[in-house]
Structure formats: structure tokens, C-alpha cells
Image (tube, helix red, strand yellow):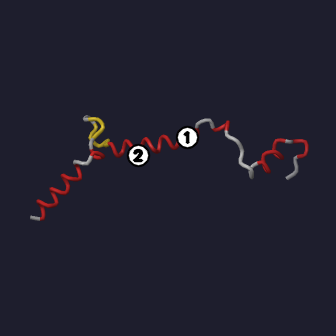
Amino acid sequence: MDLAILSAQNNARRDSWLDKPVFPWWPAFTIEILIIVLILGLTVFTRIYDLGARTMSHDEINHVVPAYSFGNYVY
């Protein structure tokens, strides 16, 4: 009796749309893993993309301006 219930619960979990494989030839690569990879990839991409064009924060200006004026470099 308990095995039948556990088997039914396992089958119910496998029928979730997140557990369906993306490619039939790669069953371990599910939709859940695809979503996680996409979120991590977009996070890394948005942190690196156009990094040089970002403005400085208000507290970074105290260190950047003296570092670029080599005439009065005092630290």
C-alpha cells in the first residue's frame, strides 16, 4: 500500500511542466534547469555589459579625481 502511494507521488512530481526535458535526446536538461541557467546568464551579462560607460557613484569621486590628477598626487 505504501509503495503504491509513493509511486503515485513520484509520478505526479515527474509530470510537472518544470520537469519536462527541453530536448528529447538530453532528458537531464529540464525546463527548470534551463530557467536557472537563463537567469544566471542574464545576471552575469547585465553586470558586465557596457561596464566602461557606467557613471561613478557619489562616494567614488573622492578617490577617482585625485588619482587622475597626477600633478598634485598625495597619498
> What amino acid is found at the position of numbered circle 2 in the picture?
Ile
- Residue 24 is left or right of residue 67, and the answer is left
SS category of the residue bearing label 2: helix
**Residue at the spot x=87%, y=42% of the render?**
70
Residue holding disc 2: 36
**Residue at the spot x=36%, y=45% of the render?**
33
Q: Quadrant of residue 7?
A: bottom left
Q: Position of residue 40 (x, y in %)?
A: 47, 44
Q: Quadrant of residue 37?
A: top left
- Most distant residue in the bottom direction: 2
**Which circle marks residue 46 in the picture?**
1
Query: Few, some or many C-alpha atoms within 10 Å of disc 1 (few <14, some 14-19, many ≥20)?
Result: few
Query: Few, some or many C-alpha atoms within 10 Å of disc 2 (few <14, some 14-19, many ≥20)?
Result: few
Q: Split into 4 quadrants, where in the image is the N terminus?
A: bottom left
- Residue 63 is left or right of residue 29, and the answer is right
**Residue at the spot x=23%, y=53% of the render?**
13
**Which circle marks residue 28 in the picture?**
none
> What amino acid is found at the position of numbered circle 1 in the picture?
Thr
Q: Position of residue 31 (x, y in %)?
A: 33, 42
- Most distant residue in the left direction: 1
* First reached walking from the N terminus: tag 2 or tag 1: 2
**Residue at the spot x=87%, y=47% of the render?**
73
